Amino acid sequence: MSQVFYADPAENFVLVNIQHDNNFYAEIRQQYDGVKLGYIRGSVDFEGYGNKYFSIERINYYAYKDDGTFFLRYVDQTGVYDRNSKLLKKANVVNTATRFCVGVSSAALENPFAPNLVIQDTQKHTFLNTNVFAYIKIDFQNSCLLVYDPMR
């Protein structure tokens, strides 16, 4: 079930550390050789919580193994999308004239299965990482992203 995908030339890549000691990462290691993220960097740089961050226009999720690379789909400031580019989870951010979403936070590159959004507040001259707007897993049977509720 190999998929061919032609990446955007502006896309940067990072490998996801799948060596965490929990059931989800153990299943990733069992199903795939690895997971990588392709991201298109946004134009906003900001600092918060003692760290430097940047906005991301879109994060593409890829899993790979011997027989190919699987494009699991993507997250952007509007939400999480599945293999058919169907919206799985909408990012519920109320944009106003002075407070609006500028993209996904680069913090998602370190914690890709719980992405945050970047909110710019022009009155306070600040940028905020939102709380996680979605929890993501992988549907291994269909090789696509899946949104789930960790409280269930």
Image (cartoon, rainbow, N blue to C red):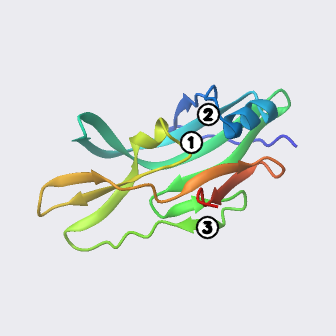
**Who's the residue at 57% across and 66% down the image?**
89
Disc 3 to disc 2, C-alpha distance:
21 Å
Q: Please tell me whether mark 3 or mark 1 is closer to you in this view.
A: 3
Q: Position of residue 44 (x, y in %)?
A: 28, 46
Q: What number is the disc on residue 87? A: 3
**Who's the residue at 77% across and 32% down the image?**
32
Name the side, left or right, on which 99 lies relative to 1. left
**14 or 129: nearer the viewer:** 129
**59 or 33: nearer the viewer:** 33
Q: Label 3's element?
A: strand
| Residue at image mark 2 | 36
Q: Is residue 41 above or below residue 148?
A: above
Q: Position of residue 143 (x, y in %)?
A: 77, 48
Name the side, left or right, on which 4 lies relative to 151. right
| Residue at image mark 1 | 8
Q: Position of residue 136 (x, y in %)?
A: 60, 52
